[in-house]
Amino acid sequence: MKQTAIKQKKEGRIVNVASRRHKLSYSEGIRFDKINDESGYNSLSAYGQSKLANVLHANELARYLKEEGTMITANSLNPGAIATNLFRYHSLID
């Protein structure tokens, strides 16, 4: 993508779809040391953790691409409330 942007003299955009749910990840953020540990697992926090990874990836990629002097931007976005099956096995009222 870098070479194409330079050769074509055009901007490039990388967009990661995240979620506002990234703010409700595990309290310690991404649990790299427990990535496959089922104890203490919470599906909604794990989902938040994956969305946090999307946001952090976009931020770091944006920093790197700017440092490299490319005309490529990297962003993450929250698509807002959309209909999904995310809660199909979860009771919102306990």
Image (cartoon, rainbow, N blue to C red):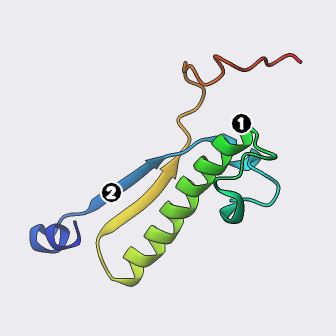
Residue 54, given in percent of the width and then of the height, sits at 53, 54
The kind of residue tagged 1 is Leu
Q: Is residue 33 left or right of residue 17?
A: right
Residue 2, given in percent of the width and then of the height, sits at 23, 71
Q: How many marks?
A: 2
Q: Residues within 10 Å of mark 1 (few under 14, many from 20)?
A: some
Residue 39, given in percent of the width and then of the height, sits at 79, 47
Q: Residue at x 71, y 52 (%)?
A: 37
Residue 19, image quadrant:
top right
| Residue wearing tag 1 | 44
Residue 41, image quadrant:
top right
From the viewer's side, name the closer residue of 76 and 24: 24
Q: Residues within 10 Å of mark 2 (few under 14, many from 20)?
A: few
Q: CA distance from mark 2 to mark 1?
A: 29 Å
Q: Residue at x 76, y 39 (%)?
A: 42
Q: Pick whichever of labels 2 and 1 is earlier in the sequence.
A: 2
